[in-house]
């Protein structure tokens, strides 16, 4: 299991455990992270899993694929340079210790 922290919209920090090989969104949903809605079920369409990657202690995560980048640009509320869709991040050991801030406004 890979440990990842999500900071919820009210500032609560929650460390969760995620299974390798699965989209990070699954673990966030299972843990009930507030603000991770995932309306599209992980199809990179809804942006209701939009989060900001604020720490990646093992080095940068792989860049977003075009589907993720486009959804962030066109559907996410207040996209930033560090915007990511956790449904498009496959959990690997490189994700260990990463910290995501759940984006506000849906
Ligand atoms: S769950 Fe819909 S974009 Fe991530």
Image: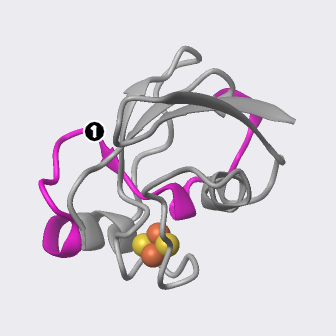
In the rendered image, residue 87 lying in the magenta stretch gets the answer: yes
Q: Mark 1 highlights which residue?
A: 82
Please tell me in which quadrant of the rendered image residue 21 appears: bottom right
Instruction: Name, please, the residue furthest toward the top.
Output: 57
Front-most of 73 and 65?
73
Front-most of 11 and 69?
11
Front-most of 12 and 53?
12
In the rendered image, residue 106 lying in the magenta stretch gets the answer: no
Q: Position of residue 58 (x, y in %)?
A: 59, 17
Above-or-below relation of 98 to 32:
above
Residue at 64% x, 55% y: name it.
32
Please tell me in which quadrant of the rendered image residue 80 appears: top left
Please tell me in which quadrant of the rendered image residue 73 appears: bottom left
Left or right of 14, for residue 106 = left
Left or right of 75, for residue 58 = right
Badge 1 element: loop
Residue at 25% x, 52% y: name it.
104
Residue at 49% x, 52% y: name it.
34
Crowding near the residue tagged with mark 1, few <14, some 14–19, many ≥20 C-alpha atoms within 10 Å: few
Numbered range of the magenta stretch:
73-94
Residue at 34% x, 69% y: name it.
66
């Amino acid at each position: 299991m890979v440990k990842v922290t999500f900071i919820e919209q009210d500032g609560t920090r929650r460390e969760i455990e995620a299974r390798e090989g699965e989209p990070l969104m699954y673990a966030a949903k299972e843990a009930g992270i507030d603000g991770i809605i995932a309306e599209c079920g992980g199809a990179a369409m809804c942006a209701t899993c939009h989060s900001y990657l604020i720490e990646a202690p093992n080095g940068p995560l792989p860049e977003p694929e075009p589907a993720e980048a486009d959804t962030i640009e066109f559907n996410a509320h207040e996209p930033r340079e560090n915007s990511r869709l956790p449904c498009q991040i496959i959990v690997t050991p490189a994700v260990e210790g990463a910290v995501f801030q759940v984006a506000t406004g849906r």
